[in-house]
Amino acid sequence: MSINLYPEYHDYLTRILTASVYDVAVETPLDFAANLSRRLQNKIYLKREDLQPVFSFKLRGAYNKMARLPEDLLKKGVITASAGNHAQGVALSAQKLGCQATIVMPETTPKIKIDAVKARGGNVVLAGVSYNDAYDYAMKLVAESGLTYIPPFDDPDVIAGQGTIGMEIVRQHAKPIHAVFVAIGGGGLAAGVAAFIKQVRPDIKVIGVQTNDSCAMKISIAANERIALKDVGLFSDGTAVKLVGEETFRMCRDLLDEIITVDTDAICSALKDIFDDTRSICEPAGALALAGLKAYVARNHLVDETLIAVNSGANMNFHRLRHVSERSELSESNEAIFAVSIPERAGSFREFVNVVGSRSITEFNYRYGDDDVAHIFVGLQTAGVNDREKIRTDFQAALLPNIDLSNDEMAKVHLRYMVGGRTHKVQNERLISFEFPERPKALAQFLNAMQTDWNITLFHYRNHGADYGRILVGIDVPNEDADSFNQFLDELGYTYEEQTDNAAYQLFLARPNP
């Protein structure tokens, strides 16, 4: 008989076991991922919360909270703030319980989620660019209207509703489990799953997963206090939370074994893995747990263990898939991109292709700009990291200087899609990359903010289906204006990064050295 190592959370066992989730939610399957298991040499299972009626686990917590409200409060109506999935859970729960629901959503929320909430009778109000902005506006409406706020994560009943996932996992897989991986935004899912598993199966590790640019929980636990992030990455919009909840922070700090962070490419790769095994398409936050699982396996050289990832949602904007497809190939090292310098003479292209050999060329960009040396931007199909390194050494052996750009963000997002080439007319070009939340008129607002006395010499923007826009701008800045230009960037209000010294820029776009 196991000993409860966390008696202070015993109340959550009762809350989870008596949760009112199955009036609307379903017990989702625990599917064996055969392809992924074979490749990772472990037994991988996917907890399919993407199969809920609202395509997300959020329905569990929302309904459990609302079903416990007094009748008089339900009649007045409820309100919440959400990036989308909790919103749909509240809207469906309101339908089931016969009450009105107002949903405050960030302006960056994918249209598919907004439409889904409206289709279930929810009154949608758009405010701000992140969950926290929407929350602040929702609190203003609560004060004005007297509506009952339904928290997306920081509430015992909501946490308990999400905890039924942990209860199902334990019931569905009685054999040993090495670890369960859960995505973390505000922390409700991780807190609920850990609250159940750690009390009934303390041998199972519960590991949280966050993105590198939205890791408020990991930073907070390291500091032993809640830390608010100034900005959050928006690719995984379902977990883009600047400040985690008080209760979820306490529980995740006490109950989680660790928190792993991953980048956008790792999420895109996990999305492809899920599709390959299930033929289903998750949203980025839905594949976050699997991305963390894969990172954990690679880091620990794990073999022959049972690992479970919670597929937390599937509310994916279809147009985002092109971005996911491109990035997943690079993440798995199935494609590499190189800058290669070849002699500017007849026959050089043929010699270059012979070095490439039987590998498929996925992209080839060239523009004449120098009498002696040609710089080409090339994409190649590869068979992993080792093959990428072999390509590099093959180029070196053929006396073809090269740079592996496979991990160069500027090259992947901008350079590979740009036309043109070097210019001889710009003396002091500075190259800056910017990020901003993608919403209606966002590009126009950016362009208005960029109206200055400095001349814009290069501009690239591509709507790649994500929830954030990425722009590359070249600006002619005389040396004597350097300090005032740096101040302008700092006061502009956009996340930016200097790219002037980027090797890809210097090869393909910068003014040639005299």
Image (cartoon, grey):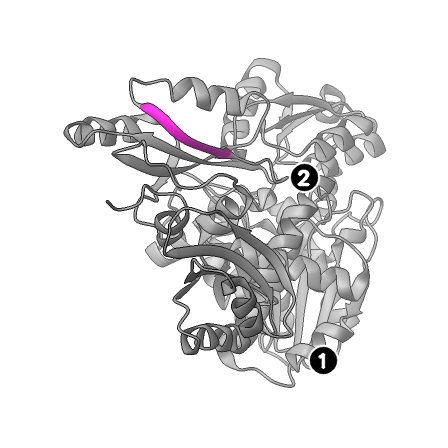
Residue stretch rendered in magenta on the structure: 455-460
Q: Does residue 314 show up magenta in the picture?
A: no
Q: In what quadrant of the picture does the N terminus appear? A: bottom right
What type is the residue that disc 2 sits on? His
Crowding at mark 1 (Cα within 10 Å: few <14, some 14-19, many 20+): few
User: Does residue 198 sit above or below 319 in this rendering?
Assistant: below
Q: Is residue 306 left or right of residue 487?
A: right
What is the x, y in percent for residue 366? 51, 51
Q: How many marks?
A: 2
Q: Between label 2 and label 1, give the one nearer the viewer.
A: 1
Single out the residue that lies furthest toward the bottom.
304
Q: In what quadrant of the picture does the C terminus appear? A: top left
- Which secondary structure dominates the residues rendered in magenta? strand
Single out the residue that lies furthest toward the top.
144
* Residue pointed to by mark 1: 38
What is the x, y in percent for residue 199? 60, 69
The part of the image, by quadrant, that contains residue 190 is: bottom right
Q: Is residue 195 visible?
A: no
User: Does residue 501 sit above or below 401 in this rendering?
Assistant: above
Q: Is residue 441 visible?
A: yes
What is the x, y in percent for residue 482? 19, 32
Asked which secondary structure carries label 1, the reply is helix
Q: Nearer the viewer, residue 258 or 416?
A: 416
Q: Nearer the viewer, residue 267 or 350?
A: 350
Q: Is residue 397 left or right of residue 125?
A: left
User: Does residue 201 sit above or below 469 in this rendering?
Assistant: below
- Identity of the residue drawn at 50% across and 78% down: 390
What type is the residue that disc 1 sits on? Arg
- Label placed on residue 161: none
* Residue pointed to by mark 2: 86
